[in-house]
């Protein structure tokens, strides 16, 4: 029996949806050194002219960012020192000051490492080409509030191959869907504290439309990264990092606190590597080289337990005292193997087990996988014995009771209850009261 069934009278409901989503956009013709080499040769650019080819494109991105800032009355803020502040905190402060609910919020800029290419001539083969390199370039962070996706940002580099990074939160997308269906809810930060119709809300969360998301991302790319469009190129969008959260929302913090404390302390000693692999839909084989383990952290906001296996992890924590959150995270969705059509080099194809494609069009299938992982973990912790009520009763009889300026400590011994009166200077034993 799940926790949601055991404590049905103490919870508002359970909802699963995507949380943090980071999507990467790349230009297929420029995505790797060989592709960029081919592009330059086809367009009659000399390989060693790569820097002079790139510089005007850099100026185009900068001029576009400055024009956007001017049009919106925003001053671009250059970050001189990393970790000097959290960008998210600064954005929330700006939102609270300006009261903006839609449109561009702020623009950051910073010098950061970037992957790029450099010209190279191989004396042995006599071939000239581009090879992978790492350097630094200026990045722009455009923070904005979209009507459907909520608070987002797009990270835009000023040097080829102009690989983009887009951030959104699935809870904001679900909130928009609930508004359209006129379903009332109470939301704090990235968590729903109450939803009037959780069954319908879950159905809305399950319906993921990658086609619509693709169109929106193309609009953002055209607006903030104008180079590809000016050259007749476009972006392909892939999932870089993703989180899927299952929230069990309790009516009162007093209901969740003792239960959560019992669960998390039991999980520390109970969850083994085999269990972690099962939760995440993975297998431990004789040649497995993935690191598997559990981390327990005590933070100001509460406690958290995290189980990880390679690029996939699952964690549990209490949020705002009301929400028991189980959250699976993946940094490489190709870790998951699914039945799909595989095209072979000889032109044939077959349906077989293969890594999940990293495209945003895998979001629907990925949601099913991660939601199942969360529910396997929920089933596991639901099997724990709940001693929270016993601990509460023990606390009641082991803490002093005060009556008429005198404290009493009541302890049960067999069929008798012994009351000990406590004063400031001495301990007075009171005759036993037989039950």
Image (cartoon, rainbow, N blue to C red):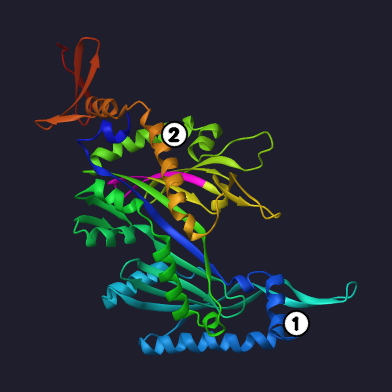
Q: Which residue extends farthest right?
A: 124
The percent position of residue 169, horizontal first and vertical second, equals 38, 61
- Camera-side residue: 274 or 184? 184
- Please give the label number shown on residue 267: 2
Judge whether 16 appears above or below 220 on screen.
above
Q: Main secondary structure of the magenta part?
A: strand
Whether residue 29 appears in magenta in the rendering, the answer is no
- Residue 322 covered by magenta stretch: yes
Q: Residue at x 39, y 33 (%)?
A: 379
Q: Which quarter of the figure is the N terminus placed in?
A: top left
- Residue 290 x, y percent position in the rendering: 63, 43
Q: Which mark is residue 88?
A: none
Q: Would residue 320 be found to the left or right of residue 332 on screen?
A: left
User: Which residues fall within the magenta stretch?
Assistant: 313-325
Farthest-out residue, left: 404
Above or below residue 427? Residue 313 is below
Residue 357 percent across, percent down from the top left: 55, 54
- The residue under the point 53% across, 85% down is 230
User: Which is nearer the eye, 295 or 278?
Assistant: 278
Q: How many numbered marks are there?
A: 2
| Coordinates of residue 4 in the picture (x, y in percent) | 28, 36
Query: Which residue is disc 1 drawn over?
Result: 47
């Amino acid at each position: 029996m799940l926790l949601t069934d055991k404590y049905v009278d103490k919870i508002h409901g359970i909802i699963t949806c995507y949380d943090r989503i980071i999507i990467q956009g790349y230009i297929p013709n420029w995505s790797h050194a060989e592709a960029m080499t081919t592009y330059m040769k086809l367009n009659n650019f000399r390989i060693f002219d790569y820097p002079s080819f790139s510089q005007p494109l850099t100026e185009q991105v900068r001029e576009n960012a400055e024009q956007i800032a001017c049009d919106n009355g925003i001053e671009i803020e250059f970050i001189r020192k990393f970790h000097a502040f959290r960008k998210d905190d600064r954005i929330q402060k700006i939102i609270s000051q300006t009261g903006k609910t839609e449109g561009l919020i702020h623009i950051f800029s910073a010098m950061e490492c970037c992957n790029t290419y450099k010209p190279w001539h191989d004396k042995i083969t006599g071939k000239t080409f581009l090879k992978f390199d790492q350097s630094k370039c200026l990045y722009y962070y455009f923070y904005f509030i979209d009507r459907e996706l909520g608070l987002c940002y797009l990270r835009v580099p000023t040097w080829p191959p102009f690989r983009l990074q887009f951030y959104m939160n699935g809870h904001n997308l679900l909130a928009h869907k609930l508004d359209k269906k006129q379903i009332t809810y109470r939301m704090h930060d990235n968590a729903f504290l109450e939803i009037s119709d959780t069954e319908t809300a879950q159905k809305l969360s399950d319906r993921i439309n990658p086609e619509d998301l693709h169109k929106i991302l193309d609009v953002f790319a055209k607006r903030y990264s104008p180079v590809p469009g000016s050259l007749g190129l476009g972006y392909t969008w892939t999932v870089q990092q993703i989180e899927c959260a299952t929230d069990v929302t309790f009516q009162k913090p007093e209901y969740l606190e003792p239960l959560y404390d019992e669960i998390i302390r039991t999980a520390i000693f109970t969850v083994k590597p085999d269990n972690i692999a099962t939760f995440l839909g993975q297998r431990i084989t004789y040649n497995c080289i993935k690191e598997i383990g559990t981390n327990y952290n005590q933070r100001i906001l509460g406690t958290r337990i995290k189980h990880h296996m390679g690029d996939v992890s699952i964690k549990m924590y209490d949020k705002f005292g009301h929400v028991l959150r189980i959250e699976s995270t993946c940094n490489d969705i190709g870790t998951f193997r699914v039945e799909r059509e595989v095209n072979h080099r000889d032109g044939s194809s077959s349906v077989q087990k293969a890594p999940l494609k990293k495209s945003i069009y895998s979001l629907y299938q990925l949601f099913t996988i991660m939601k199942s992982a969360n529910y396997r973990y929920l089933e596991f912790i639901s099997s724990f014995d709940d001693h929270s009520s016993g601990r509460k009763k023990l606390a009641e009889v082991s803490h002093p009771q005060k009556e008429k300026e005198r404290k009493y400590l009541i302890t049960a011994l067999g069929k008798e209850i012994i009351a000990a009166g406590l004063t400031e200077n001495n301990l007075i034993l009171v005759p036993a009261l037989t039950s």
